[in-house]
Image (cartoon, coloured by chain):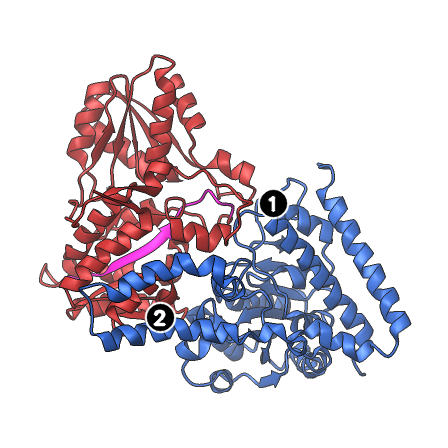
Amino acid sequence: MPPDLWSLYTLMLKSRLFEEAITQLWKDGLISGEMHLGTGEEAIVAGIVSQLREGDAMALDHRCTPPLLMRGVNPVLILRELLGRPDGLCSGRGGHMHLFSRDYLAASSGIVGAAGPAAAGFALAARYLRPGTIAVAFFGEGAMNQGMLMESMNLASVWNLPVLFVCKDDQWAITTRSSMVTGGSLDERARGLGLPYIEVNGLDVGKVWEAVQQAIEQIRSGKGPTFIHAQCVHLEGHFLGYQLLRVTRHPFREMPGIAGPLTRSLLSRSGTSLRDRLAGLRVIISALLTTLRDPRRYSTNDPVMLARAALKPDSARLSELENSIEQEIAKAMSSALGECVT
Amino acid sequence: MRTMYFTEAIDDALAQAMAQDSRIILFGEDVPLLRRNLLVRFGPNRVMGAPISESAFLGAAVAAAMAGLRPVVELYMVDFLSVAMDALLNHAAKLESFSGGKWTAPVLVRAPCGGGYGDGGQHEQSLWGWLAHIPGLTVIVPSTPADAGGLMLAALDHDGPVIFLEQKLLSETWLEFLASGGRDTVQYDVPAEGARGPVPKKWEPVPIGKAMLRRVGNDITLVSVGVGVHRALEAADALTKDGISAGVLDLRTISPLDRVTLCEVVAQTGRLLVVDEDYEGFGLSGELAAIVLEAGIQIKYARVCTQTTIPYARSLEDQTLPNAERIRAAVRQLL
């Protein structure tokens, strides 16, 4: 069975527009702390969540909005939670990194790598209580260096647990290039622990769907865990207001505050040799330059635009669909911002 | 006298020490960017990034300290220490005792902590009581830039493991990096005198384990650390209108506690109110009461602490964390 691109695009666009609305709330100061979006990883999430069934569980990371939305959690409840309202998904007490839905067996965590053990536990419960169901763990490649994730991959392997480990790889661990802090390859790590390893282009929702379909079937049939490695680009960086992106997008506004202290330190009388200092400066400049060569600028790195391009020939159906999704999100927004209903 | 922001002062004192002692190295998650000013002054051999592997790099820091280095390990938040607790609980803290006093691990763990900006209960904890509970760990919570720099210097001189906690609400850089993200549409109740203030031209160590009386008062003593000190000062100001004279004692160090000063000051007023952003149960607030009672001092006692998991919603969070209003109400009740 081939993937239904229309329904996958629907999930992705809904999530994108929803998170664009959230971005506005954040900019307006209605969300006062951190806000991590899943913009850019929609193809990975949609390709997987669309294949989940009743009783399947999800262990989520700090980018938990898209999977919950695509799984079917009421968007109004999510928005109200992000606004900290008592009628939100978690009564305004959890917040964006700590969204929980007992109905969908979905639990989030802001602790890097925590999705690993959680998915293993959900899978263990599935084996006793809901045979044939599975657990999915979503995490970034930065989490691959966290002990508890590696331990839970091994645990799932030796206990033959029905877990789909999903590594969403954007090559950045917050402000650090992952290649600088990750030894060896994820491929060998997964295989070394006894997990089948599948690499897939995380920008292409159809490819993700196809790659995952067989893996999920295997997991459901009791053949143990699988590791999916999917590349993506986070369109807003690590979180909204991400410092590296701010500096490259608004250099004249952001640079003065950074350059002054940096220059004073560089020229400070005591310290290491000039050579070492310049080596230090190169580390910073290289991070900025890599961010400047911003893969976010290209629509070919935007999974929503890519899926859209494939559907473009049927422009009438496409615009009808897009209009209805836009209206749905706008309705959810106005409903969420409306009067409290507890 | 110079004026500095809170984190600027810590980094400045750290730089002064690094220039004098080549054994001091810095590492942790995103440290090259977060401590970029130190990176360009001391080079990538002494200021290093680390993978998101807290148990590995914290455990390594403990042993590196045992073997002669003076590592400063930085965590993104004290909440994430939970992932690597073994290195502190079972190793760094026990070494001096296990070795019969022959070996110590002078590792300095630096971590932002605390709430007040809407990040939810997994990213806004204080946890100093949890850490100070363990014999062998020194726990520092400064409340002003001058103390922060001076205590950093003392911590670097200290011969055992030190946890240096930096409240995000006082830190210009953490609040910008984690909370506002460059926005001017958000507001946080930042205590101005804690966030920026006078600092000495050359840093001198502020002794560990010495409390500081921030305000003299006759009717009651408010005892706190970090942001709580400023909330207590704010409440004490307001209480003068009610004719109440409240003193404020800033502990500055949780472990070791300055028992002598605590008992002296509390004995004079006969009333102790603890303001603690950390959890109420089994923590600092109860410990202070126990110390005073053990010293045979008769007092009236109350506490304003965080009693539950910190809620995400800002309005709920403001009520959950100690604030001047709650402190005033508790004082009135005690009198």
Chain in blue on the image = A
In reply to whether residue B129 is colored magenta, the answer given is no
Viewport quadrant of the N terminus of chain B: top left
Q: Residues within 10 Å of mark 2 (few under 14, many from 20)?
A: many
Where residue A85 appears, x then y in whole percent?
64, 41
The part of the image, by quadrant, that contains residue A235 is: bottom right
Chain displayed in red: B
In terms of secondary structure, where does tag 1 sit?
Answer: loop
Q: Is residue A246 visible?
A: yes
Q: Contact (CB < 8 A) between labels 2 and 1?
A: no
Q: Position of residue B82 (x, y in %)?
A: 39, 58
Q: Quadrant of residue B80?
A: bottom left
Is B108 within the magenta?
yes
In front here: A231 or A243?
A: A243
Q: Quadrant of the C terminus of chain B?
A: top left
Q: Is residue B59 left or right of residue A160?
A: left
Direction from residue A48 to residue B265 in the image, left or right: left
Q: Is residue B194 above or below residue A75?
A: above
Q: Main secondary structure of the magenta part?
A: loop
Q: Secondary structure at mark 2?
A: strand
> Which residue in the rendered view is the most extreme toward the top?
B243
Tell which of B296 and A189 is nearer to you.
A189
Q: Which residues are magenta?
A: B104-118
Q: Amino acid at mark 1?
A: Leu
The image position of residue B204, as x and y in percent, is: 14, 48
Badge 1 is on which residue?
A30
Q: Which residue is mark 2?
A: B49
Tell which subunit mark 2 falls on: B
